[in-house]
Amino acid sequence: MLEFQHLQKTCSSGVLARRLIFALMLLPISLAGMTDARAQSQTDTIALTHVTVIDMTGAPPKRNFTVIISGNRIIDIRPSSRPTIPSGAPVAVIDAEGKFLIPGLWDMHVHFNRVDTTFPLFIANGVTGVRNMGGELADLLRWRAEVQAGKLLGPQIVTCGPIIDGPDPAAHGPTLVVKDEAEALTAVDSLRQRGADCIKVYDKVPRDAYFAIIEEAKRQSLPVVGHVPLSITTREASDAGQRSIEHLGSILEGSSSLGDELFSADKSLPPVKDPSEFPRRLAARGTRMLDTYDPQRAAAIFAHFVKNRTWQVPTLEVKYTQTFIDDLFAKGDVRQKYISAAEQEWWSPSRNFFARYRTPEYITYRRRLWQKELDLVREMHRAGVHFMTGTDLGGAFIFPGFSLHHELELLVAAGFTPMEALQTATRNPAIFLGQSHRLGTVEKGKQANLILLNANPLDDIRNTQKINAVILNGRFLPRDQLDKLLGDAAAAAKN
């Protein structure tokens, strides 16, 4: 048995332990077998000593523990008073006294089309897994293969590929348009054969095509995720088996005492000619929707979500940025150095697709809607609905990696405890993906995607931003390497 002594009291600066002071008790071990974590290319094993483990199972924090990682797996977790060091291989020992260990984070709703800026920001922020919700499938699969082969430093990627939408599609980017059941079946089969992990549906999918997609995807063992098409209700989507609903779907519409009248009123209006007329109509209908919100109708929808285990990805971050874009633009953000000039150009409210035609009544409505959606998330959470984090990366003032930490803050503002919020980015995505046997918690046998924090996130959710190091698939990345990744992303954004 070996008893580890404190190796270094300045671990918070990111400097790693360089020697092991130990007492020989039962088993002989050579000092040559212990090495600095910076020489990890020569060792497969890391020992984090004296760390507080927040395993994300819901159990209380485990204080003064040693976590041993070999290759890309956690092979042991035990009190630091009695750690076991694997024999036959050099070990990088890291004194993590005063530090907190949590699983790597997942952003379950992103869009990206370049990796030189995006991936470094994900990893520097502890985002070790992402679900891409619409993009060029060939590119996404290539990047995933390069990450898996170690050619590219990046997160694990789950992807839907092109979005399935109906005639006159509302979706942006790569899209498969289907007008009937036959085309729906062909689209699902095509995406499966090309290697998609899920099927994303969008606003304009026709009713018969939607249900055909659901049934064919079940047969192909592919989850259907995304928007709730306008042709069906949120309750119907849940009952049909849509696995996750993004952006809260049409829950508020379904919870209005006006019911179908909200939509039928829109159909009776003449076509929009002035672009500003569209937000005026949205504000008018939305105000009626909020005025007629019925808690009992909402509770009935929540009950279907719980019964059917329909996951919610509310993407509060994009709702926040769209609501407060004027304030964000006026204030500016130091993180804009990670965003290319071309992308920043359309972040301006005068250029942004979602902001440039706003009217005063629409701005007022959006701020009221924002508060109601926070309340809605709180009500669903209390009802037992399952949640995952997602930022909708690709929108204005949404920053890869960074914005996921703000999404956690917003969930806490909506009534989640810090533990519950963290689970939406760790344990819950693993459960949703059917990967809880190897991801999502800090437990023996799990994949070593971890974050070492300088402060306790259960005391303040903002402490998830105080990252000391990231362990990516068993590779230890101390603070100075994470800072280099940030510098690389800033440099790439200038090109």
Image (tube, rainbow, N blue to C red):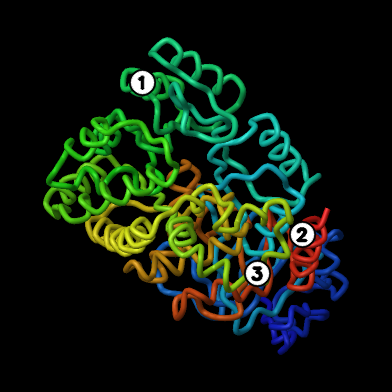
| 50 sits left or right of 152 in the view | left
The residue indicated by pointer 1 is: 215
| 147 sits left or right of 67 in the view | right
User: For the residues carrying marks 1 and 3, which lies nearer the camera in this image?
Assistant: 1
Q: How far apart are marks 1 and 3 (CA)?
A: 51 Å
**What is the three-letter code of the residue carrying label 3?**
Thr
Q: Considering the image in quadrants, where does the N terminus appear?
A: bottom right
Corner quadrant of residue 185 = top left
Corner quadrant of residue 350 = bottom right
Disc with the residue nearer the chain's start (1 vs 3): 3
Please, is residue 334 above or below residue 300 in the view?
below
Residue found at x 42% / y 47%: 276
| 296 sits left or right of 44 in the view | left
**What is the three-letter code of the residue carrying label 1?**
Glu
Mark 3 is surrounded, within 10 Å at the Cα level, by few (under 14), some (14 to 19) or many (20 or more) other residues, namely: some
Return the residue found at the far bottom: 9
Mark drawn on residue 296: none
Q: Is residue 171 visible?
A: yes
**What is the three-letter code of the residue carrying label 2?**
Ala
Mark 1 is surrounded, within 10 Å at the Cα level, by few (under 14), some (14 to 19) or many (20 or more) other residues, namely: some
The residue indicated by pointer 2 is: 489
Disc with the residue nearer the chain's start (2 vs 1): 1
Q: Distance between the residues labelled 3 and 2?
A: 39 Å
Q: Is residue 56 visible?
A: no
Residue found at x 46% / y 79%: 460
| 205 sits left or right of 68 in the view | left
- Pick the front one: 106 or 341: 341
